[in-house]
Image (tube, helix red, strand yellow):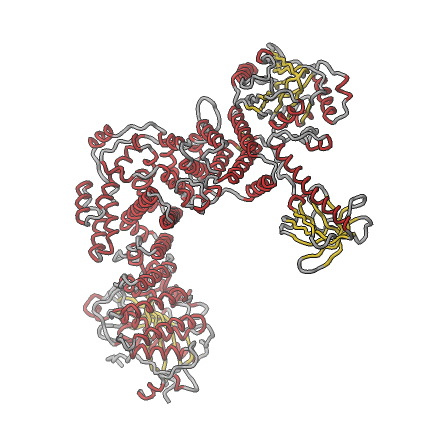
Amino acid sequence: MVEPFFDYQFRLILIGDSTVGKSSLLKYFTDGKFAEVSDPTVGVDFFARFIEIKGNKRIKLQLWDTAGQERFRSITKSYYRNSVGALLVYDICNRASFEHIPRWMMEARRHIEPHQPVFVLVGCKLDLAQRGRREISSEEAKAFAEQHGMFTTETSAKTGLHVEEAFNAITQEIYSRIQSGEYKLEEGWDGIKAGFVRPNSNLDLHLIEAEPAKSPCC
Amino acid sequence: MFRNRNWFNRNLWKPKNVHSLDHLKYLYTILSKNQNVSDGNRGLLVETLRSIAEILIWGDQNDSSVFDFFLEKNMLSFFLKILKQKCGSYVCVQLLQTLNILFENIRNETSLYYLLSNNHVNSIIVHKFDFSDEEVMAYYISFLKTLSLKLNCHTIHFFYNEHTNDFPLYTEAIKFFNHSESMVRIAVRTLTLNVYKVDDKSMLQFIRNKTAAPYFSNLVWFIGNHVLEIDACICKDVNQLSGQTRLSDLIAEHLDHLHYLNDILCLHIEDLNVVLIEHLLKKLLIPMYIMSLIPRNNLIFSEQNEKQSLISTALSLFLLSQVFLIIKERQLVHTLANILLKGESDFIFETEQNLRITNNILINKNEELENELMVYTENSEFLENPLAVFLRKKNSINFDKNESVCHSFATSTYSINITDEEKEQRLAQDTQIQTGSFLQAIFENLHCRENDYSVLFALCLLHAISSNSGIGKSLLDTFIFSSGSEYKTKYSVQLIENLIQITSISCQAGCRVRLLTLELTIALIKKLVLIDGKSILLDEHYAAIIGVKEESTSLLRSFYKNEDIFLDMFEDEYYDMKKRSLNIEWLMMDCNLLLQPTNSPMTGVEFSKRLPCGEVERVRRAIRVFLLIRELVLSLSHETESQLPLTDRNTCISIGTSLDLNNSDLITCTVLSKDGNKTRRFLAMDSNQLILVEPHSRLLGWGVTKLAGFLQDIEVTGDKEESKCLHVIIHHTNTGSAYSAKFLFDDHIRCMAAKQKLIKGRAKARKKKMMQIAKLLDIPVSNQPSSSSLLPYNLFTNRHQPISSLLYSSCKQSQPSKIISNFVYSLKPQYTLNIKIVTDNVSETYKNTPSTSCESSSRVIDNSLNTEEIPLVNLSYKIEENIPPKSDKDETTTLNDGDFLHKINNINVSENSVEDDITDKVWELSSGNFPGGSVVITLERRSGSRWKEEWTIQYCAKFQVVRTSFVFFIELQKQRVVIKFFVKSGVKTAEIIPKLRAVFQDDCQSSTRIYE
């Protein structure tokens, strides 16, 4: 039995200031690669990956990468509605990007309404921070996350450190909220969708998955 | 994870349902298996791309998982990969079409934004397609156009990159603004407008700084070239059809340009408009259009080639009127109108410079970019201009295609620095042209020389200027609506005189003024002098127009014939005139106007736009001229039409009307219609109509109309085989359609009676109408006592009759002489006057006459007697001395024993006028009834001087008073009538008297005419 390939499909959105490293984070997560040079995102970008969480549940993640630039703000707004969770991304070496997190959170909350989004706070560029350019301490980030009841981690898209963990955490949280009945499948809302179960599964094609990154921490 | 490869293959079965996610998956497999385009898979790929568009659109509206799949598989990247291969136009076209369909139809904004994201679209836009392939070009440009339709202040960021300062959608598109294919040009225009519409500051800044000057100057240069082409096309005598088609295409294209310019201007983007207007004025409108108005020999050219950018005066008038008809943007039209109307020499100086620049450009147009750059850098020290950098960059990419863009650089040197010495030098060289010389040139073109070719355009231009809402009212008031100084009129005296001149010329037999020109002239006169329906025309001009009316009447009189066709034509022209309304904008689209006026109907030119050909058309023309001028006079004198149409169709009997037919002649008949139906009807007639009735269901002796047709249009023929039968054809029934039937009567006698009645009725109806026309034309009708009601002697009924007809018929009745001298006198309109008549001798014969006219006369006398006692100021004028000894032979002197027509215009009846009722009525003192008396024209004042005038009247007198104007004429008889004018107290009579005197002595406007 090949089908179903997954139990649930979650749609997530990555938000945060321009140049904090959203696209690199996502690229590492879906591709396992790090690009030394990358152009700023124009508008939005899309990726998908399967992930396995506790209890042998296979989840398909649909990930919207968004441009952090102000001029695309009106465009990216329309991607909130169908998202169940948001990764709040900041640059560990850039204080301003961290200080803007509450604003991003507010915006996401406002646009994801009436649904209650799951947030995780993701610090990027840990590799640079380790070379002494850190502006946000882990403690400060943790304090903020605790205050808002969210998971937080510091990642490096270059080394892949904690990347998997960040996505795992948000997926796990969403899944447990489904288990607890807080989230329900809704017609016309693409935040959470049931897995592809078809009686005549032969007609379905393989979904070519992105290879899970070989994260050193997993 | 297991992956069964065999299973994969099994899935290549095409799903039955093409609108399903499965189908997209199937298409995806095809795409992924055919990533390299080869001859073998081209057809398959095209079909796949086509289907993908279809299913994505379906999914967009029905199943979000379809687009999810498209996203997950990043299928857009396949498209880009295919495009990057040299895949040939076949695949390219399909790819562009697929993208076009996607962008056009996808409603889900998240999907649309995804497609627009990350510069994929921009890379497609800048992709070097093979534009020599027509199909690729067409799909490419429509793809761009579709994208431009998706532009708004959010999506603009996908296309316009602030950081790299690049906007490929716009910059790539404008490269094709001058493409040979008109669809491409139109698409580019639409696209640019869509771009300008987006209210994004930095984008507009980009357009303003980087592209506006080259693009607009390029555009203007292109239009200018186009205009030169039109000019060349006109100069060559285009008699061949191909030449006409070419001209028509050129004009249509030019109109498109103007509309495009107007569309841009109407967006009110200040930054862009400033650049555009500057280019338009300095490169096109002034050097090419306005300068061409000045006769060539008045211009001195410092360089020979300056002449080359001039076009024919008529064309420049035509083009300028198009500009004013289409463009309403205040800044441009006001500036342009300002130059045209004021024509300051400063402006001309600048113009001369621009003339030179434009010409340089025209000459150099075939030279290479580098050369031009040299020329212009020398002239203007231009190198540092960012435009140059921008354009060079552009041009280096695609030199061949960008010849026009290169060129635009050349034309964009609008900021040429000329030193002051140079300026002075040139000023000395250049001809000094008087202020207002352009307006003078326009007026100059109002004179008909060989024909009315340029007259028409000058009229159009004046019309367009005066109707353009963008031009400041005060400017118009100064130059068109007012002459300013001495007359203190509210319109331009020079203009109105020119216009009256045109109307006058068009009343001459064999003149070369087209009906259209006359119609436009009349429209313009009305526009100038009618304010809220009231005329502000000076009396002398009004008199001149009355004179023109006489001329038009006389012209038509010479064609008047008692023939059926004349009546039919007359009525046809009348209804045609009523039906058509003048639309100048529409008119100016007709390229036929640019050809020399023709008279041959074989050119396909409408009758009103050409000269008459043959006798019949000349008659038609005369009728139309008469009707047009008559209408003008009526509206100027604020009167309503009472004599036309000849039959008021509204008062005619129509189908279903119940009629009391007691004591009417009725003939029973059976109507056999064409389809074989037999119906029993009764035939009745009134003066105009043939009526078929059936008995009324309730009222005895009444009938219900079943058919009504005009007697004048019937044809009756007997049946050769059956003597009880008549064939009747009615060309115009009340319902409008023709009717034809066979009428079967009870016997031969009844049939004959009916036939006779119908034929007689027809003749009578026509005769009646012909008499009405004759009356309109002041032609004497044979005096029939029985038809006296048709003659203009009824009290009240002839109120709106032209004076001249009154004049003529009454003259005819008394048969005094062969000559009627016809004068129009005018009084200034400022004074309130009343008229009273006093006869000094109310004779017995007068009162005994039993006719209606006698009653009216006696009323006059009563009135006048009542008012005798108010002597104010008497203004008199001796007429006796002008009356020569009676002589029938003396036919040419202006003051003769004939009639005097007096017209006093615009007299406001004062509220406290003694006899209100006489001011709005017509009295008539017919021949033989009037006991004798004198006409005394007096202007009276409560105290002081008195100027009294007595006229001895010899035959009869008739006058007319209407509320706004006072008209009377006197026919000399051996009777006397006294007429008094009263002036409202408080008016400065010291001014009135010299004016009246001037008017009475010098203002003979119309010429003597001889009636035989």
Q: Which quarter of the image is occupied by the C terminus of chain B? A: top right
Indicate whether B979 appears above or below A39.
above
Rendered view: A207 above or below B781: below
Image quadrant holding the N terminus of chain B, namely: bottom left
Locate residue B612 relative to residue B91 in the image: left or right.
right
Is residue B528 visible to the viewer in this orientation of the structure? no
Q: Quadrant of residue B152?
A: bottom left
Q: Is residue B994 left or right of residue B224?
A: right
Q: Residue furthest right?
A: B700
Tell which residue pokes out farthest to the front in this image: B721
Q: Is residue B605 above or below residue B785?
A: below
- Taking the image as shown, residue A3 lies to the left or right of residue B614, namely left
The percent position of residue B715, horizontal first and vertical second, equals: 65, 47
Nearer to the camera, B158 or B264: B264
Q: Between residues B810 and B803, which one lies in front from this camera angle?
A: B810
Q: Is residue B429 left or right of residue A167?
A: left
- Image coordinates of residue B506 in percent, x first then y, are 48, 33
| Numbered disc total | 0
Pick whichever, B854 or B478, lies toward us: B854
Image coords of residue B694 (percent x, y) = 76, 53
Q: Residue at x 20, y 34 (%)?
A: B419
Q: Quadrant of residue A137?
A: bottom left
Using the rendered image of the protein, determine whether residue B177 is visible from the camera's viewpoint.
yes
- Across and down, in percent, residue B127 comes to 26, 64
Nearest the eye: A84 or B709: B709
